Amino acid sequence: MAVAVFAAGCFWGVEETFRQLEGVTGTAVGYTGGHRADPNYKEVCRGDTGHSEAVRVEFDPERITYDQLLEVFWACHDPTQLNRQGPDVGDQYRSAIYPQDAGQEALAKASLAREEASGHHRRPIATALEPTAPFWMAEDYHQQYVAKQKAKYGTAPSCH
């Protein structure tokens, strides 16, 4: 198995998007890219940890490639919004890719260049390629939040 980490706004909907993909074997939401060890949701929302809300994606590279995950990443949010997604504002909602090794970094850079050259966006891409950082699991009630809401109420909130 391999691991990828992405930040694309509120982690609830992003996790659900990746969770549905054939070849993804597990997901977790959490916090990464900041300076505080083991942050909690309130600290991250206050904006004083430097962390983004992120999704850790475990995948089988023989069934889905990192490049395919990058395509889903670009499609599941607006990468031109700086430190926000829709009504969610703050650097914890930034668009970022956290490559886990040199191979992922090279693929992410090439994917970013393709996305910038694609003509799909009217504004410049704000997505950052950030260094690999510790991934801190979010509280249990955030894990698979959308799926839990669907099971409980028959419907779920949409983040984007």
Image (cartoon, helix red, strand yellow):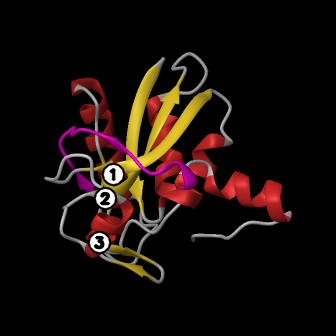
Q: In the depicted view, which residue is nearer to us: 12 or 116?
A: 12
- Residue 108: image x %, image y %? 31, 40
Contact, CB < 8 Å: mark 1 with mark 2?
Answer: yes
Q: Which residue is mark 1?
A: 31
Q: Nearer the viewer, mark 3 or mark 2?
A: 2
Q: Tag 3's secondary structure?
A: loop
Alpha carbon of mark 1 to alpha carbon of mark 2: how far?
A: 6 Å
Q: Is residue 26 visible?
A: yes
> Where does label 2 land, which residue?
52
What residue sits 29% from the left and 43% below the top? 98
User: Can you tell which mark lies on residue 148?
Assistant: none
Residue 150, given in percent of the width and then of the height, sits at: 78, 58
Q: Nearer the viewer, residue 52 or 152?
A: 152
Residue at 13% across, 53% down: 35
Specify the quadrant that holds the C terminus.
bottom right
Q: Is residue 28 magenta?
A: no
For the residue pair 10 and 82, the one nearer the viewer reads as 10
Q: Which residues are magenta?
A: 128-141
Q: Is residue 32 above or below residue 121?
A: above
Q: Is residue 155 left or right of residue 86?
A: right
Q: Which residue is mark 3?
A: 124
Three-letter amino acid code at disc 3?
Answer: Pro
Circle 2 SS class: strand
At label 2, which amino acid type do we have? Ser
